[in-house]
Amino acid sequence: MPEVLKAPLVVEFPFTRSLGPVQSAFLTGLREQVVLGVRTADGRTLVPPVEYDPVTAEEIRDLVEVAPTGTVTTWAWNHEPRRGQPLATPFAWVLVRLDGADTALLHALDAPGPDSVRTGMRVRVRWAPERSGAITDIACFEPYDGPAAEPAGHDGDFEDMVTGIVAPARLDYVYSPGRAQSAYIAGLAERRTLGERCPSCRKVYVPSRGACPTCGVATGEQVEVGPRGTVTTYCIVNIKAKNLDIEVPYVYAHIALDGAGLALHGRIGGIPYDEVRMGLRVEPVWSEDGRYPDHYRPTGEPDADYETYKEML
């Protein structure tokens, strides 16, 4: 049997958002070891706080401090913590209704094992030694057998309020291509670009997914396309990506390879970014190890007529 290809992949980006007055007070409070909720018109206290009542949709701004102690309402044991999770050793994910709150807060519970966790157990906040105004200022919860803590009645007015956060989003996974994409990858190793032709509409798709996206039927007939192609659309990238050693600005484009019925994407090089245009004829420049096109450069041919690629925009 042929070798099954697989590779680890990571999708990662920083998510930056500004905060409204309620979330700003909540996160600033965590920095100061104060847990704030918000009180609704009917007297419920919501923790974590929201800016609109989930029942009535009315705006709510009445901040109220709750205790850092509470009760576990439900839980699940995490046998193998992942990168970026609150604790590096096995722990329980818990919903905790803090004393004075009517809703529960999701966080980690540091416990020796699943046998030591139960619904109804009492816990308290363990504060992180260094705090910046984020949910991670609560390092975790820990078991607690003392009396309920008494909040000081803080009104949510702090100096140097937290007004925005940057939350890193990351997805780690192992990708294994199917038959069609494995053939495509094997072709690249030989500096060939392979697509597959739909037996119904006769379009050639590159890279193929093993089925025609238009007709929904399986594809199997391999067709070599390119190596030259035409720029159909493009964008100018002005923000430098992390761990990508390419100076900005540069151009990323959709390229319709000769003989293909679908454009693929690639970087355009060998030409000033402001001279890239629709219809530009390009050819691949292969990576040093020859495994994939590093970028595409102009061929020097006249630009393609719009009518020849308009269906692939």
Image (cartoon, rainbow, N blue to C red):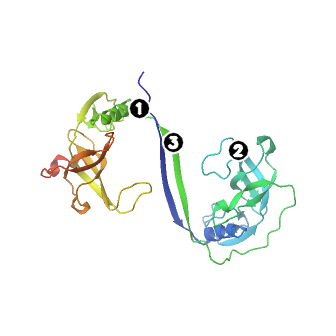
Q: Secondary structure at mark 3?
A: strand
* Extreme residue toward the top, this view: 1
Q: Give the Cα separation between the discs numbered 1 and 3.
A: 16 Å
Q: Which residue is mark 3?
A: 173
* Extreme residue toward the front, this view: 288
Q: Which residue is mark 2?
A: 90
Residue at 21%, 61% (x, y): give it: 275
> Crowding near pointer 3: few (<14 within 10 Å), some, many (20+)?
few
Relative vertical location of residue 305 with respect to residue 41 in this rendering, above or below: above
Q: Secondary structure at mark 2?
A: loop
Q: Which residue is mark 1?
A: 178
Within the image, what quadrant is residue 182 found in?
top left
> Crowding near pointer 1: few (<14 within 10 Å), some, many (20+)?
some
Relative vertical location of residue 168 with respect to residue 191 in this rendering, above or below: below
Could one spot residue 299 in this view of the protein?
yes
Q: Earlier in the sequence, mark 1 or mark 3?
A: 3
Could you say where residue 290 lies in the image, as x and y percent from the top left?
Answer: 31, 40
